[in-house]
Amino acid sequence: MASAKKKVDPISDRSRALNDQIAALETEIKKLDTQLQRVPTPKFRSTAIPHGATIARAHEPAPSPPPPTAHEPVFEKVTPLRDTDETATPDQFNELGVRKYDLPALFNRIRNHFRRPTTSNPRLVAYLAAGGVHGLRPMRYEKRVARNRFIFFAIVLFVILFGTICVFMRSH
């Protein structure tokens, strides 16, 4: 007869262990918080010098002196968020500091907009194009199917438009 034991679920075991750790950390946080929130005992001044410094008790650390205040403001170098164009020359800007209209740069931006992004793994692209990955069709086959589908639907659209024009012309 087979024993009816439950299989041990590693995820639930790990979550139980993590919950136990969280509970232990929460109790430690509460204990440390109560130690910090104790009412501070009054400090005693020296009776020999009435306005002297406070005397620290044996179990309390001596108070640290206040940090010196800065008399002058401190400036830090701020780097711009975008890189400055190193190819920019002063003659590319007008007297107000606005960039002049640059037709070749506009053409390059438009051309780059329509380019495909560069691949992060050109070797994988080469494998996919050649059909080197087992179980996947080569890209040339997929391109051929997509091209034939486009040609078919273009012809169907042309026939429908031609038929609509013919019907319209006969009725008028």
Image: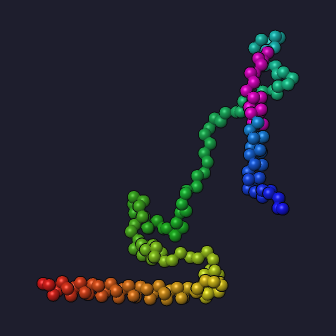
Rendered image quadrant of residue 35? top right
In-front residue for pair 46/21: 21
The C terminus - image quarter: bottom left
x and y, in percent, of residue 163 in the image: 25, 87
Up the image or down, 59 lies above or below 17; here it is above
Residue 147 inside the magenta-drawn segment: no
Up the image or down, 64 lies above or below 125; here it is above
Residue 161 is left or right of residue 61, and the answer is left
In-front residue for pair 65/88: 65
Please identify the residue farthest to the right as the structure is shown: 58
The N terminus - image quarter: bottom right
Residue 86 is left or right of residue 100, and the answer is right
Residue 169 is left or right of residue 54, and the answer is left
Residue 145 visible in image: yes
Colour setting: rainbow
Up the image or down, 115 lies above or below 17; here it is below
Q: Residue at x 63, y 80 (%)?
A: 124
Residue 108 visible in image: no
In-front residue for pair 116/30: 30
Q: Residue at x 77, y 19 (%)?
A: 41
Q: Residue at x 84, y 21 (%)?
A: 57
x and y, in percent, of residue 122 in the image: 62, 80
x and y, in percent, of residue 8 in the image: 78, 57
Number of marks present in the image shown: 0
Q: Residue at x 43, y 86 (%)?
A: 149
x and y, in percent, of residue 27 in the image: 76, 36
Rendered image quadrant of residue 71? top right
- Per the rendered image, the range of residues in magenta is 28-44
